[in-house]
Image (cartoon, rainbow, N blue to C red):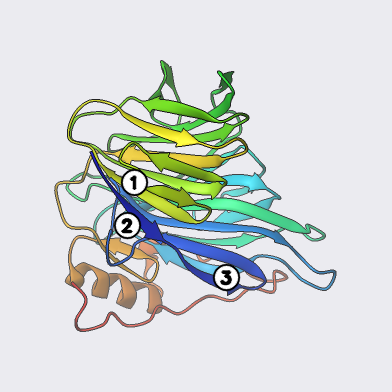
């Protein structure tokens, strides 16, 4: 195996530290996982409104929200409104192609004073016909074994399978180490793997050490691989089979070509019905965001 360490680009977004691990120049995707933000942990001041994200669109992807602390309201153009709490997943599917999309807003409830989450996107296989949808998963497989606590957020791992809908083979596992240990990870042939360090540190079998807000990308050629973690470490293990087509990202859109991204920008800014019913923003304090033009050099 060969391990590469990626360091986050960290920004303050409305008082929330957001560490972006994917995409970046050294690595765009891990399987179909194409976007990875570690948001928080954040404590809001008394006069802060917390997370306030106006109406914005998505295409050719699933948003995958893994909540660690706090609560967030989701509202979308299909009519779903859902509060997500810790150890729950919200999975929103934008659908594929030039005629499908979705829009949503995200807000912390009034009075909520903390937020900690992992926000991921999953690129959809654009050669498949996939309809927009929203799903909430309040219960996921959880277990403790040999000094580590596990939550399986998607896919199959250690003989268990999560209920989360998938359109390409993936796995996502939240792991917290109560004691120092070396973990043997079962690996699928042809998959790519990544390890987000939320807290503490891990070391790969070839000696690469990663700390909080760093990501290990593991080029796995055959067989399993091992990770050594110190006590108190918290990670998210990600893996998946690469998609058979390019994955391009601009703003909140995913596509397999620049032309498709340009069409998405135009459609959203011109209120195309492809994104569903306009979300009623009255009384929310939120606005409808405008999509920026796709740069000429994007490829």
Mark 1 secondary-structure assignment: loop
Q: Which residue is mark 2?
A: 100
Q: Where in the figure is residue 91, as x and y percent of width and height?
A: 48, 44
- Single out the residue that lies furthest toward the front: 207
Q: Quadrant of the C terminus?
A: bottom left
In the image, taking residue 135 as reference, residue 138 lies left or right, namely: right
Q: Where in the figure is residue 213, as x and y percent of width and height?
A: 50, 56
Report if the CB atoms under discs 3 and 2 are less than 8 Å apart: no
Residue placed at 76% from the left, 65% from the top? 44
**277 or 40, which is in the foreground?**
40
**102 or 214, which is in the foreground?**
214
Residue placed at 15% from the left, 52% from the top? 245
Q: Which residue is mark 1?
A: 131
Report if the CB atoms under discs 1 and 2 are less than 8 Å apart: yes
State which mark lies toward you, 3 or 2.
3
Q: Is residue 38 above or below residue 231?
A: below
Regarding residue 280, the answer to whether it shows in the image is: no
Residue 74: image quadrant is bottom right
Q: Quadrant of the N terminus?
A: top left
**Label whose residue precedes the other's in the sequence (3 or 1):** 3
In the image, taking residue 217 as reference, residue 41 lies left or right, namely: right
């Amino acid at each position: 195996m060969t391990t590469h360490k990626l360091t986050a680009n960290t920004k303050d977004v409305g008082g929330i530290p957001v560490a972006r691990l994917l995409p970046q120049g050294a690595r765009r995707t891990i399987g179909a996982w194409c976007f990875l933000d570690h948001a928080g942990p954040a404590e809001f001041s008394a006069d802060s409104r917390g997370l306030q994200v106006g109406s914005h669109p998505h295409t050719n992807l699933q948003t995958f929200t893994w909540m660690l602390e706090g609560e967030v309201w989701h509202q979308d153009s299909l009519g779903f409104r859902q509060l997500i709490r810790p150890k729950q997943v919200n999975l929103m599917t934008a659908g594929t192609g030039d005629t499908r999309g979705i829009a949503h807003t995200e807000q912390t409830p009034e009075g909520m004073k903390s937020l900690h989450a992992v926000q991921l996107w999953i690129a959809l296989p654009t050669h498949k016909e996939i309809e927009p949808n929203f799903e909430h998963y309040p219960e996921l497989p959880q277990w403790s074994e040999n000094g580590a606590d596990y939550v399986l957020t998607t896919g199959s791992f250690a003989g268990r399978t999560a209920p989360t809908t998938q359109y390409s083979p993936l796995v996502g596992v939240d792991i917290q180490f109560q004691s120092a240990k070396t973990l043997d990870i079962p690996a699928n042939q042809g998959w790519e793997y990544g390890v987000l360090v939320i807290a503490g540190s891990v070391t790969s079998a070839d000696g690469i050490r990663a700390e909080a807000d760093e990501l290990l990308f593991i080029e796995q050629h055959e067989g399993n691989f091992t990770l050594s973690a110190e006590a108190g470490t918290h990670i998210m293990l990600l893996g998946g089979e690469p998609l058979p087509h390019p994955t391009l990202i601009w703003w909140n859109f995913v596509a397999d070509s620049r032309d498709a991204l340009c069409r998405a920008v135009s459609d959203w800014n011109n209120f195309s019905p492809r994104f569903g019913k306009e979300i009623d923003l009255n009384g929310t304090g939120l606005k409808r965001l405008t999509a920026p033009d796709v740069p000429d050099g994007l490829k």
